[in-house]
Image (tube, rainbow, N blue to C red):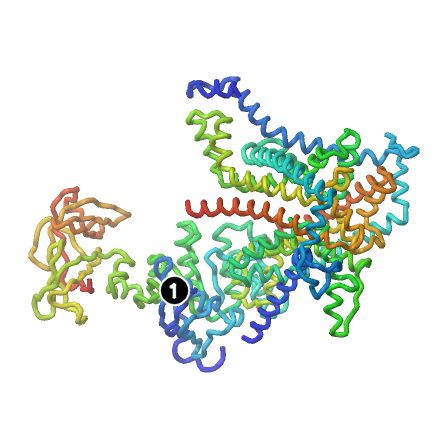
């Protein structure tokens, strides 16, 4: 870790990974900045774990280049890299005690026994597992093992920590706690966290930036809020959830806006710069479920769709109302309970779904 | 069996009657008893009989039931027995060590460096020797190492040799390796293939190089399998009769040669039994010690 | 990169040498069984079937082969039955002393054959079995049953424990369930075990050497011939034993393999 540290910390430049005929990563390019919490997210088989493994040096790219502070690291052996990984199933050494597990990496660096014990104990203290130091790892619960795995990686005091589905093996209530603990650790340590997850709620809750992948390619990179507000394509719009996707044909409305007609009815939205979206094209209109209002009668402002209530799910203080239009299109509306307490929402009830024209945006079909 | 048919037609809702219970017991006994009785009658009883016979005496070439310790005192005090015991134990131990060391790189290659299809094929190949007449393999080995044999013919152009291992302890060890190496490679391969891949990757990820990973992660993870393989090598070599006779020239004799000699020519079965019982006791002790080594002393307090 | 290639090459060469050590005796047996020269050495003396002719003309070898086949046939049936029974009991029942029960059945292969041989000889001498083919078979069943048990137990591990209860629920007695459900399910393993135990018996020489007396089996004949002078006839016998055993093992392997193939198709 010497030399200039200007520019991105890690550059992933047109990297691909193939196993025989199987393509794990088709082509991926993005940068990781020093100190950020970046999440690689996507459905299983999207290439996110392979990308992480290539960063750790456990897989070698078939094509492309990985550069750490500008230096090519493709051929660096995994043990020459400084990017400890927290494994999905922890990969603790069952034949070593907890503290020996935490010391393992320090021992490889040739730290004297007393020093590495001290350092290991500090990290275990910090993660609240110091009391288990002499235990065997198979006596620990899942949450405790997770902490051992974290301590083992962090004891190396790396500049970059890799996490592979760190929360997936935990109970739901532990998951939420660990999630905020990871965020806190990241903030306190100021090092780079690269986290692979298939859960958009985890990624959006923890990361500064999210890389959404599908079929071995990057679909969108950005801050969680930005991705949520404007998906780059249909895949992202569907994958992040909470969006209504309306299919239809585009026609001219006025300068700066476009009209779409489909089974859901018709609506207006701003005309995007994308040349593929214009008059006569098949398009998709995306409207976030929490941007749609629900009312008993028309007001004549914004987009208004007539629909019937199918059902309603209430979680805590918010409700999701599922509607169906006369044309057979489905739409979901997310509201707080107090926003809809005056609207009768029995199944079969006719209602109006309304949203402002600026809230929707077009994507190619 | 006719009883079975009658229970089949009973109403399904009927409570478990005594006849149903009897059927179940008869059924369980039909399957449970034959293996028990057979192994008891033809395994436990002969071995028990062997122990009993150590206290018998031979009077004018006739076996006579007795309760004498004469056979034990004779064998335990016999210099030839003590020498044979130390020699056999040492050679079997050496074989276990050599076989383990020689097999390890091959097992490592099979487990980690070859394609699954190649590995499956080679593993199947390793089973082949078990079903190839062992005496014939020893005969072949004898030919290989004979003074005019292939090994010496191959060494001659290089100005080496002739080497003569036949009728020496080295010859016996070579024979023991012919016997044990396939099994040791096989067991080590299974042990290594079962080491979780992520543990190896985790070690690499934490800065552990290839050779160190073998010593600090792979060997401890596969410890049980590696020790079991060495134990089997010891047990097989310790009891083998063919290699020390035909390759070692029974000079000096091993324990199994002593047994065979006492039985076939000396006709002193009680003394042979004493040797056999001591061998079994030794093997039990060795296996217990090895199992303790394999499963004991784990990381951390349990 | 070069160091990696070197390391890989060294490992492959070492592995090749280990396999060469293991297989050289087997290969040379077969090769030299066709060698015209009396003393097996290089160069080869030319192709010849004379050693095969010699052993087929040898009445003691013929007798040995027939005895071996009789013993192997009887052993395979008995050992497979006992192995199946023990495997089923281990699969089906929980009872006090079960560990001791399975250990008793599984133990014999861990006892050196030379000791099993002496024990068999002293015991069978008393009950009048020594020197008979029955005596040899009894010893071979003791030795081979554990292999049958292991093979069939592995198959039973794939049988849903609830399936027997389902059969009873449909009105099948334990006997009907056994013949209609459990045995058909285990059939590949049972057949494989018949071949495998036959091969174990066919190659066993130590128990047979102690017990067989004048009724020598083929491996015992080989041992006797080894004590004599170098004779390529041993190679010819070795080759025949090899062919017979390997046929049995390959058939067993195919039966096990077919089961795996079928399972993967079901998945």
Tell me if I can see residue C107 in this picture.
no
> Furthest-right residue in view?
B60
Height in image: A126 above or below C77?
below
- Mark 1 nearby-residue class (10 Å; few <14, some 14–19, many ≥20): some
In this rendering, position of residue C183 left or right of residue C146: left
In this rendering, position of residue C183 left or right of residue A264: right
Examine the image and state in which quarter residue C125 appears.
Answer: top right
Host chain of mark 1: A
Height in image: B211 above or below C84?
below
**x then y, percent, for residue C85:** 58, 33
Seen from the viewer's position, the closer of residues A310 and A114 is: A310
Residue at mark 1: A23
Seen from the viewer's position, the closer of residues A349 and C144 is: C144
**x then y, percent, for residue C76:** 62, 38
Height in image: C263 above or below A61?
above
Q: Residue at x 62, y 64 (%)?
A: C16
Q: Residue at x 13, y 62 (%)?
A: A357
In this rendering, position of residue A78 left or right of residue C114: left
Q: Residue at x 86, y 49 (%)?
A: B82
Seen from the viewer's position, the closer of residues C41 and B198 is: C41
SS at badge 1: strand
User: Quarter holding the C terminus of chain A?
Assistant: bottom left
Total number of numbered labels?
1
Examine the image and state in which quarter residue A108 appears.
Answer: bottom right
Tell me if I can see residue B201 in this picture.
yes
In this rendering, position of residue C241 left or right of residue A144: right
**x then y, percent, for residue A282:** 15, 62
Seen from the viewer's position, the closer of residues A290 and C177 is: C177
**x then y, percent, for residue C36:** 70, 59
């Amino acid at each position: 870790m010497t030399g200039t540290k200007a520019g991105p910390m890690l550059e992933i430049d047109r990297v691909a990974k193939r196993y025989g005929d199987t393509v794990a990563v088709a082509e991926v390019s993005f940068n990781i900045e020093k100190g950020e919490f970046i999440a690689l997210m996507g459905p299983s088989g999207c290439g996110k774990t392979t990308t992480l493994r290539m960063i750790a040096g456990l897989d070698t790219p078939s094509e492309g280049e990985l550069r750490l502070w500008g230096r090519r690291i493709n051929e660096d052996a995994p043990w020459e890299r400084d990017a400890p990984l927290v494994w999905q199933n922890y990969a603790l050494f069952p034949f070593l005690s907890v503290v020996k597990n935490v010391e393992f990496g320090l021992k490889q660096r040739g730290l004297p026994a007393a020093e590495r014990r001290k350092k290991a104990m500090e990290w275990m203290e910090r993660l609240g597992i110091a009391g288990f130091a002499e235990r065997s790892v198979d006596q620990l619960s899942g949450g405790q093992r997770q902490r051992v795995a974290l301590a083992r990686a962090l004891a190396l005091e790396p500049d970059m920590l890799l996490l592979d589905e760190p929360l997936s093996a935990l109970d739901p209530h532990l998951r939420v706690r660990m999630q905020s603990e990871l965020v806190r650790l990241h903030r306190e340590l100021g090092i780079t966290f690269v986290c692979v997850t298939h859960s958009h709620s985890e990624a959006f809750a923890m990361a500064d930036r999210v890389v959404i992948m599908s079929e071995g390619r990057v679909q969108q990179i950005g801050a969680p809020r930005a991705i949520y507000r404007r998906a780059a394509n249909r895949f992202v719009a569907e994958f992040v959830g909470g969006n209504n996707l309306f299919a239809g044909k585009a026609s001219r409305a006025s300068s700066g806006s476009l009209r779409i007609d489909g089974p859901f009815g018709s609506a207006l939205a701003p005309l995007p710069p994308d040349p593929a979206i214009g008059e006569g094209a098949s398009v998709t209109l995306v409207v976030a479920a929490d941007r749609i209002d629900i009312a008993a009668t028309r007001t004549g402002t914004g987009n208004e769709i007539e629909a019937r209530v199918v059902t309603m799910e209430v979680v805590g203080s918010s409700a999701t109302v599922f509607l169906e239009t006369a044309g057979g299109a489905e739409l979901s509306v997310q509201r707080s309970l107090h926003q809809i307490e005056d609207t009768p929402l029995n199944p079969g009830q006719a209602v109006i779904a309304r949203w402002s024209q600026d809230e929707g945006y077009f994507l190619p079909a | 069996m006719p009883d079975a048919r009658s229970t089949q037609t009973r109403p399904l809702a009927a409570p478990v009657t005594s006849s149903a219970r009897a059927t179940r017991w008869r059924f369980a006994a039909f399957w449970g008893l034959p293996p028990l009785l057979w192994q008891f009658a033809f395994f436990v009883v002969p071995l028990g009989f062997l122990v009993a016979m150590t206290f018998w005496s031979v009077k004018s070439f006739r076996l006579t039931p007795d309760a004498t310790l004469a056979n034990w005192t004779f064998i335990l005090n016999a210099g030839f027995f003590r020498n044979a015991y130390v020699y056999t134990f040492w050679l079997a131990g050496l074989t276990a060590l050599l076989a383990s060391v020689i097999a390890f790189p091959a097992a490592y290659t099979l487990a980690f460096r070859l394609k699954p299809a190649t590995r499956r094929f080679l593993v199947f190949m390793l089973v082949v020797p078990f079903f190839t007449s062992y005496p014939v393999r020893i005969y072949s080995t004898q030919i290989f190492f004979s003074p005019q044999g292939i090994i010496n013919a191959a060494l001659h152009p290089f100005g080496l040799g002739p080497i003569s291992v036949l009728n020496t302890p080295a010859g016996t060890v070579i024979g023991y390796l012919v016997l044990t190496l396939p099994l040791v490679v096989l067991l080590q391969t299974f042990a290594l293939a079962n080491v979780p891949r992520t543990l190896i990757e985790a070690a690499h990820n934490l800065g552990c190089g290839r050779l160190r990973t073998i010593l600090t992660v792979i060997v401890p993870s596969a410890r049980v399998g590696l020790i079991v393989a060495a134990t089997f090598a010891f047990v097989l070599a310790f009891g083998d009769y063919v290699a020390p006779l035909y390759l070692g020239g029974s000079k000096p004799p091993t324990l199994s040669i002593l047994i065979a000699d006492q039985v076939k020519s000396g006709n002193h079965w009680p003394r042979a039994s004493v040797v056999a019982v001591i061998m079994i006791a030794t093997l039990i002790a060795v296996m217990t010690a090895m199992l303790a080594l394999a499963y004991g002393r784990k990381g951390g307090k349990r | 990169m070069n160091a990696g290639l070197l390391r890989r090459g060294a490992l492959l060469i070492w592995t090749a040498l280990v396999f060469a050590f293991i297989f050289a005796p087997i290969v040379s047996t077969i090769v030299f069984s066709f060698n015209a020269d009396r003393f097996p050495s290089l160069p080869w003396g030319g192709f010849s079937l004379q050693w095969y002719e010699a052993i087929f003309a040898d009445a003691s070898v013929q007798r040995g082969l027939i005895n071996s086949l009789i013993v192997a046939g009887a052993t395979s049936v008995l050992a497979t039955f006992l192995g199946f029974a023990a495997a089923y009991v281990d699969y089906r029942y929980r009872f006090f002393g079960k560990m001791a029960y399975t250990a008793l059945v599984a133990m014999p292969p861990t006892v050196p054959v030379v000791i099993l041989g002496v024990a068999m000889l002293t015991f069978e001498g008393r009950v009048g079995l020594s020197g008979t083919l029955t005596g040899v078979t009894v010893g071979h069943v003791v030795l081979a049953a554990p292999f049958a048990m292991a093979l069939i137990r592995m198959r039973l591990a794939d049988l849903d424990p609830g399936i027997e209860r389902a059969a009873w629920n449909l009105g099948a007695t334990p006997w009907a369930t056994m013949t209609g459900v459990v045995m058909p399910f285990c059939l590949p393993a049972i057949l494989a075990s018949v071949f495998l135990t036959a091969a174990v018996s066919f190659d066993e020489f130590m128990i047979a050497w102690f017990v067989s007396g004048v009724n020598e089996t083929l491996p015992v004949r080989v041992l006797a011939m080894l004590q004599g002078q170098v004779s390529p006839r041993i190679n010819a016998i070795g080759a025949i034993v090899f062919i017979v055993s390997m046929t049995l093992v390959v058939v067993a392997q195919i039966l096990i393999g077919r089961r795996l193939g079928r399972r993967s198709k079901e998945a």
